[in-house]
Image (cartoon, rainbow, N blue to C red):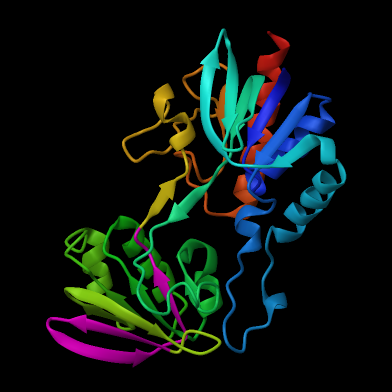
C-alpha cells in the first residue's frame, strides 16, 4: 500500500512526485513517459530557441531527479482507478493492481486533430494546437488559425495582436456572432474564410502553405505556421466512473486541487482549471501534493 500514487508524467505529475518525495511520502509515479508537454516544442523556420523563456528547464530538472530515483516511478499506462475501503486501487494495462491512500491524477489532455495530409508529419514544425502557448513566436509572421469556438476566437485575437496577418478559417459559424467575433471581423490584419474545410498542410521541414476550400472555392495560401484550435480532450477516462468530471470530461477541482471524492486530487490540463502553460502546471502539481499531504496526515 502506497501513501500516494501520481498518475501522469508531465509538468504537473513530475512536480507532484518531487514534492511528495520532499515530504517523505511513500510515492509512486506511473506514466507512459516522463516529460509530457515539455517533450513538445514548436519550431519555426528561421526562429532561434533562445528568444523566449519557458518552464522546460525547471521540468527537466525534476525529470532527471525522478529518473535517478528509479524506485519512485514506473513506465506503464493506467486503465482504471477504483475506490476500495476508503483507499484506491489502481489497475494498470500490464495487469498490475496497486493500492494507495491518495491519488493525484495529472494525465493532461489531448488536442483534437483533423487528420489531413501533412498534419502528423508537421506537428511541432510550424503546426501547433495551442495559441496561448505559442502565439508570441509569430511576431510579424503570417499565421492560419482553424476553428470557430470561443477558444479559437480568443486564439485568433491573441495572434492578431502580434502577427503580420492572420487567416481565420471557420468550419462553421461557431461563436462569430459574439462581441469578440464581431471585433475580429473588423480587424485590419485578419481575414475570415466562411465554411472552410482544411484539406492539406504542405511543407518539407516546416509548414509552408495550407490548402483549403471556402464557399466552394479551393485555395492555397503561403504561411509561416498553422494553429488548429478545436479544443482539448481531457485524459480522464480512468476516473470516469467516480463522478468527478464535468460535461466536457474535465476533472472538477477546488482551490486545493481536491475533487469531490475524498483522497482524490488532480492537477494540470486534465482539470477544469485554465492551464496550457508549463509554469501553471508546475504550480498546480505542487499544490495538489501539498494538499494530498495534509489529507494523509488525517488518515
Please state if 79 lies on the left or on the right of 295 as rendered.
left
> With respect to residue 178, does 20 lie above or below?
above
Question: Which residue is found at the position 42% from the left and 71% from the top?
Answer: 227
Q: Which residues are magenta?
A: 209-230
Q: Nearer the viewer, residue 74 or 166?
A: 74
In depth, the one of 297 and 159 nearer the eye is 297
Answer above or below: position of 113 versus 206. Answer: above
| Residue 256 visible from this viewpoint | no
Q: Position of residue 150 (x, y in %)?
A: 30, 56
The residue lying at 69 percent from left, 18 percent from top is: 294
Image quadrant in which the C terminus is located:
top right
| Relative vertical location of residue 289 with respect to residue 199 in this rendering, above or below | above
| Residue 23 quadrant | top right
Answer above or below: position of 187 versus 272.
Answer: below
**Left of 170 or right of it: where is 75?**
right
Image-quadrant location for residue 24: top right
Residue visible at 27% across and 71% down?
A: 184
- Residue 217 covered by magenta stretch: yes
* Majority secondary structure in the magenta region: strand
Quarter residue 237 falls in? top left
Amino acid at each position: 500500500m502506497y501513501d500516494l500514487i501520481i498518475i501522469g508524467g508531465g509538468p504537473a505529475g513530475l512536480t507532484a512526485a518531487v514534492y511528495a518525495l520532499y515530504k517523505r511520502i511513500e510515492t509512486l509515479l506511473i506514466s507512459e513517459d516522463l516529460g509530457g508537454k515539455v517533450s513538445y516544442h514548436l519550431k519555426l523556420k528561421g526562429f532561434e530557441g533562445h528568444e523566449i523563456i519557458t518552464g522546460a528547464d525547471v521540468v527537466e530538472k525534476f525529470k532527471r531527479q525522478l529518473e535517478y530515483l528509479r524506485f519512485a516511478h514506473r513506465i506503464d499506462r493506467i486503465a482504471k482507478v477504483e475506490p476500495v475501503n476508503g483507499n484506491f486501487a489502481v489497475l494498470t494495462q500490464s495487469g498490475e493492481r496497486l493500492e494507495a491512500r491518495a491519488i493525484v491524477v495529472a494525465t493532461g489532455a489531448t488536442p483534437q486533430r483533423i487528420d489531413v495530409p501533412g498534419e502528423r508529419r508537421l506537428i511541432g514544425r510550424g503546426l501547433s494546437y495551442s495559441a496561448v502557448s505559442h502565439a508570441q513566436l509569430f511576431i510579424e509572421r503570417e499565421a492560419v488559425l482553424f476553428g470557430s469556438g470561443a477558444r479559437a476566437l480568443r486564439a485568433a485575437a491573441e495572434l492578431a495582436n502580434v502577427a503580420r496577418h492572420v487567416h481565420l478559417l471557420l468550419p462553421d459559424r461557431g461563436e462569430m456572432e459574439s462581441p469578440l467575433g464581431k471585433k475580429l471581423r473588423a480587424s485590419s490584419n485578419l481575414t475570415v474564410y466562411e465554411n472552410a474545410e482544411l484539406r492539406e498542410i504542405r511543407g518539407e521541414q516546416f509548414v509552408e502553405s495550407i490548402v483549403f476550400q471556402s464557399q466552394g472555392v479551393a485555395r492555397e495560401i503561403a504561411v509561416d505556421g498553422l494553429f488548429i484550435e478545436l479544443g482539448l480532450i481531457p485524459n480522464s477516462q480512468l476516473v470516469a466512473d467516480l463522478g468527478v468530471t464535468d460535461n466536457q470530461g474535465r476533472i472538477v477541482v477546488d482551490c486545493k486541487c481536491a475533487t469531490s471524492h475524498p483522497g482524490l486530487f488532480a492537477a494540470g490540463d486534465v482539470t477544469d482549471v485554465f492551464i496550457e502553460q508549463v509554469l501553471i502546471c508546475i504550480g498546480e502539481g505542487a499544490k495538489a501534493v501539498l494538499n494530498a499531504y495534509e489529507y494523509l496526515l488525517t488518515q
